[in-house]
Image: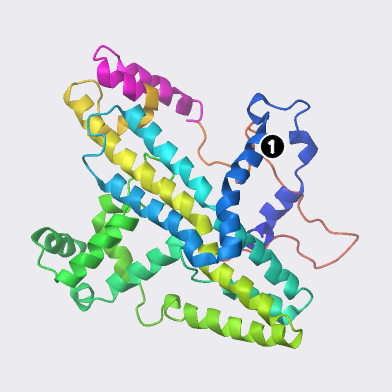
Amino acid sequence: AFENADASLGRAIDSVDIDEYTPSLVPAGAKGFAWRATKNVSRMLPSMLKCYFKGTDDSIKPYKKWSEDIMELCQDSNFMKDASFGNVWEVLINKWNDSLRMFGPVLVGLISSSQVKKIFSGNKEAEDLIDSLFMDLEGNPTSEMGHAMLRLALFPELQEIQTSNVFVHKLEERTLSNDFMVAYSDYMKRYGCRCMKEIDIATPRTQENIKEFFKGLKKIDIQNNAINNVVERRDAAYQKLLVIATKTRRQKSFVKHATNIKKLMGYREHPKYMYVVLVSSMRRRALSIGRKFVAQGRMECIEQIFDLTIDQITEAQTDPEIDLMSHVRESMSHYATMEHVKEYPLLFDSRGKIIRGKRKTAEGDEEGVLYGDPISC
């Protein structure tokens, strides 16, 4: 995979000696990992077995309800309104961890993925089609977000607007159609929290930059968009695979596992998405606290709230004597050690070792042969 993207990066990865990074002693943080992992998997077993014996539709319902409840909770401005920053985070992350017990059906989807590959093992034509079964799956938040963006882009009134300033003005004045406003509000409720580097609480969200979001909508090719035919491609692959499976008398097994893939595998990304929902909720709370600290003269700008730890923010909420700027300076001091770096190497480890692959060299006397890696212009 690395070689397809960058040949030199692929060689660098191949040159890594894993033994060099294998500790002679088990690190303290890794001790008991196997037991903890086993314990977590055991929590999924009841919902996994229910899914296996009673079917997919009912088994995933508890998780879907949980995710909708958390979505509403994170949108509620009155939720734990007067609680400390640390207490709110503890409650939310515990709720997120609780979802693990409802995640068993996805294990069934993973098993079905493996079984489908076994059914068609050795059949090159079938192996090329299997990837299409994983397109546009139910419960996949990234796929659903793509569909939601396309629906917004298709509105004629959106197509008529030429600038982001006009779009924002119309939103503020609510002069767009009710249908558009409902679709837009639902999008922002569900996906306004998403963005590049979305795990980082310091990263601004889509809902904070509506102008850029509008530009993204305008870039969508509504006539020749891949989303328009992805379902047809998946269904066509399914029908071809069904014909192949029927020839080997394994059609019943294929239909069962393909159904599991369609209904369950999309949810494997969902916990990460819900974590982003939680992070976005905490970001809004952190910014609110940051405004208060700036108004009190304890910080120089609101964004410095993200240079503090959860404990530091929590303590500062009740102790006005804490010097927040000293914490900020201490947090930022680590960046000073890298100020001299103008451009980071493509691959390096936590010790600062730059990893480079061996360059291709000529073997023997090959006149007129140029060695190197092709690049695009």
Residue located 73% across and 74% down the image: 119
Residue located 55% across and 66% down the image: 55
Task: Tell me, yes or no, whether the highlighted magenta stretch contains residue 49.
Answer: no
x and y, in percent, of residue 310 in the image:
38, 27
Q: Which residue is mark 1?
A: 34
Residue located 70% across and 54% down the image: 10
**Vertical order, 75 against 131 (above or below):** above
Main SS, magenta residues: helix
Q: Provide the residue span drawn in magenta.
A: 312-339
x and y, in percent, of residue 372 in the image:
72, 60
x and y, in percent, of residue 203 in the image:
37, 43
The answer to whether 183 appears left or right of 102 in the picture is: left
Q: Quadrant of the C terminus?
A: bottom right
Residue located 74% across and 88% down the image: 247
**Vertical order, 223 against 367 (above or below):** below
The answer to whether 166 appears left or right of 45 in the picture is: left
**Of 187 and 322, the residue lying toward us:** 187
**Of 231 and 363, the residue lying toward us:** 231
**Vertical order, 210 against 260 (above or below):** above
x and y, in percent, of residue 83 in the image:
27, 28
Residue 166, quarter of the rendered image: bottom left
Residue 190, quarter of the rendered image: bottom left
**Of 337 and 235, the residue lying toward us:** 235
